[in-house]
Image (spheres, coloured by chain):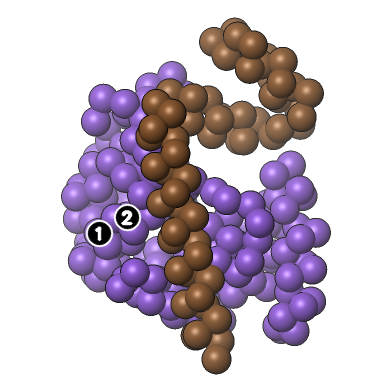
Chain colours: A purple, B brown
């Protein structure tokens, strides 16, 4: 992986599905699937910390050739993609052979996978099952993170939620 | 947070500062600038196709 790889969400989710990784999609891509006009080129996921799932996630990250994303090194930095490492971290910003993937085991404003899974929507996208965080949970997380990009995105997301009449 | 100047971006730096992108967004743009125009277009097309299909799937799932 010599250059920064282009984002290919279908192939990222195909690898996660092939390894039966349990996760919830959050962040900008989840927001886009709920109707946000902002197109994003990375995938933020919250994986389950269940031990067998961590094993499957580690295998998926090997297949994705996941590396630590860092400025100045387009192909990223190699790291120990072991279950032990995954159990010890709360967040990893990665670049894979199919683009950028951020792992966040406990996104801001949430208590992690079980919390997000409760109201997540299961959708089949191009033949792959994807668990998508509810829009209200995407908003909750972005409001808690409160980064500039979150503050820019929130008004539209709240408007979408109001139109949908989802839980608030 | 406004964009921080980045000497490697040359002329693009000025535009990035004017629209006051966040540091995260600047980092994404910097990485995208390393892609060829064809790669950037392919990436965008793939993302949009995924989002279009995903929106339809979410609507179906909501019933």
- Residue at mark 1: A15
Labels 2 and 1 touching (C-beta < 8 A) = yes
**Is A45 situated above or below B18?**
below
Q: Which element is circle 2 on?
A: helix
Query: In the picture provided, is A35 more to the left or to the right than A132?
Result: right
- The x and y percentages for residue A153 are 72, 53
The N terminus of chain B - image quarter: top right
**Is B35 situated above or below B50?**
above
Name the image quarter holding residue A11: bottom left
At horizontal 43% and vertical 28% (from top left) the residue drawn is B37
**Chain containing mark 1:** A
**Is A129 situated above or below A101?**
below
Q: Which element is circle 1 on?
A: helix
Judge by depth and name the residue closer to the eye, A128 or A121: A128
The C terminus of chain B - image quarter: bottom right
- Residue at mark 2: A12
- The x and y percentages for residue A23 are 40, 67
**Chain containing mark 2:** A
At horizontal 61% and vertical 29% (from top left) the residue drawn is B26
Query: In the picture provided, is B29 more to the left or to the right than A99?
Result: right
Is residue A6 shown to the viewer in this render?
yes
At horizontal 27% and vertical 68% (from top left) the residue drawn is A17
Name the image quarter holding residue B40: top left
Q: Same chain for marks 2 and 1?
A: yes
- The x and y percentages for residue A125 are 39, 71
Name the image quarter holding residue A24: bottom left
At horizontal 55% and vertical 81% (from top left) the residue drawn is B59
**Is A97 situated above or below B19?**
below
């Amino acid at each position: 992986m010599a250059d920064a790889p282009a984002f290919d969400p279908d192939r990222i989710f195909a690898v996660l599905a092939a390894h039966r990784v349990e996760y919830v999609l959050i962040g900008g891509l989840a927001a886009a699937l709920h109707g946000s006009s902002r197109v994003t080129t990375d995938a933020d996921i919250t994986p389950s910390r269940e031990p067998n799932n961590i094993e499957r996630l580690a295998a998926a990250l090997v297949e994705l050739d996941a590396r630590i994303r860092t400025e100045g090194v387009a192909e990223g930095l190699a790291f120990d993609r072991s279950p032990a490492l995954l159990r010890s971290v709360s967040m990893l910003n990665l670049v894979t052979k199919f683009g950028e993937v951020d792992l966040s085991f406990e996104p801001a404003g949430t208590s992690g996978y079980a919390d997000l899974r409760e109201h997540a929507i299961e959708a089949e996208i191009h033949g792959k099952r994807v668990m998508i965080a509810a829009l209200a949970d995407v908003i909750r997380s972005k409001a808690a993170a409160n980064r500039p990009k979150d503050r820019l995105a929130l008004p539209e997301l709240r408007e979408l939620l109001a139109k949908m009449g989802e839980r608030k | 947070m406004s964009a921080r100047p980045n000497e490697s971006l040359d002329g693009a730096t000025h535009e990035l500062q004017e629209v006051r992108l966040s540091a995260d967004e600047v980092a994404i743009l910097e990485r995208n600038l390393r892609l060829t125009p064809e790669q950037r277009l392919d990436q965008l097309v793939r993302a949009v196709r995924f989002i279009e299909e995903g929106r339809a799937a979410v609507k179906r799932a909501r019933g």
